[in-house]
Image (cartoon, helix red, strand yellow):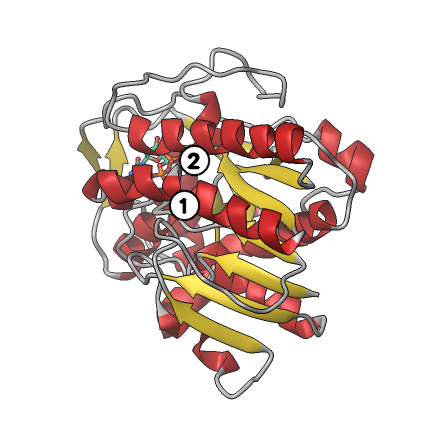
Amino acid sequence: MKILLTGGAGFIGSHLIDLFLKDDHEVICVDNLLTGSLHNIKHHEGNNKLKFIEHDISSYLDYKDKIDYVLHFASPASPVDYLSHPIETLEVGSLGTFNALELALIKKAKFMLASTSEVYGDPEVSPQKENYWGHVNPIGPRSVYDEAKRFSEATAMAYKRHNHIDVKIIRIFNTYGPRMKKKDGRVVPNFISQALNGEPLTIYGNGKQTRSFCFVSDLVSGIYKVMHSDIETPINLGNPNEFTMLELAQKVSNIAGVKLKTKKMPLPEDDPKQRRPDISKAKKLLGWEPKVNLEEGLKKTIEWFKNA
Ligand code: UDP
């Protein structure tokens, strides 16, 4: 296949490129490098199956050749990144989604949207199933990301219904692994950098809020399966094992071989209290579930951070 991937120089995008090239697909990576980095795809330098276009998909992209699949993954994704780029985040989740969908329409290509567990907001039910409509503050600081992704989903579904594009929507839950930016502000890179630097781990609020962490290799294998499936409605991809941030801090310290030291910090506004995917749909329709447990994934990530 010839795959056009927006956000291909980002954390998840670059792991997808590894997988696509390994399977001999051709990839056109479109990225404006706002939060992504060429470092993430540098190891493919010289591979003529990968083409890089530095471009912000929020502006129209004129691409002449054929495309079989458009994957729209471009967006700041960590709270620190999207809070410091609020307008760009809204643009890429609205104008960017239109431009990516128009490309798919013109090229008669399939389309995949990288959506997020943030569409569920601060969920009042747990675990979150795909049929839960969410609990999102439409004007809070996180709304630039949450509402942009909800708008993206609505846009993708409208193109599907009205223009008959083959659309897949994946809702990605917290994912971690090599190539996360040390300073992207998310909890896993924060805790790992702090532990490796002998600093206290910053616990926001009381640390009892929960997340469920999926190792990146599990996530990309799930994405690949969705791409090849005939699933027509949004699907959760994530690891259903749920931990508090205090538990995570303890695990990171243990694996890094340091004594746990913590520093309390204020809880960010609208920080979800719990998050855990119900992945029964993915299990049933794709035969997919994560294989890498948190200890194993943290070990690999910590090793990578040590050498990065
Ligand atoms: N968090 C924390 N310490 C940090 C960074 C984050 O306690 O140094 C908490 C944050 O408040 C949230 C959870 O970790 O409850 C996950 O935050 P992250 O930014 O990784 O992603 P989110 O799931 O909120 O998008």
Name the mark nearer the viewer: 2 or 1. 1
Disc 1 element: helix
Indicate left or right for 270 with 73 as reference.
Answer: left
User: Where's the N terminus, which quadrant?
Assistant: bottom right
Q: In the figure, 223 relative to 181: above or below?
A: above
Residue 291 visible to an observer of this rendering: no
Residue drawn at x 68%, y 31% is 279
Q: In the figure, 30 relative to 172: above or below?
A: below
**Identity, as a three-letter code, of the amino acid under mark 2:** Glu
Residue drawn at x 59%, y 29% is 157
Q: Report the Cα–Cα distance between label 2 and label 1.
A: 37 Å
Q: In the figure, 173 relative to 300: above or below?
A: above
> Which residue position holds label 1?
96
User: Where's the C terminus, which quadrant?
Assistant: bottom left
- The quadrant in which residue 122 appears is top left
**Identity, as a three-letter code, of the amino acid under mark 1:** Gly
Task: Report the image quarter containing ligand 1.
Answer: top left
Q: Which mark is residue 247?
A: 2
Residue drawn at x 60%, y 38% is 170
- The quadrant in which residue 156 appears is top right
Indicate left or right for 76 with 217 as reference.
Answer: left
Q: In the figure, 35 relative to 28: above or below?
A: above
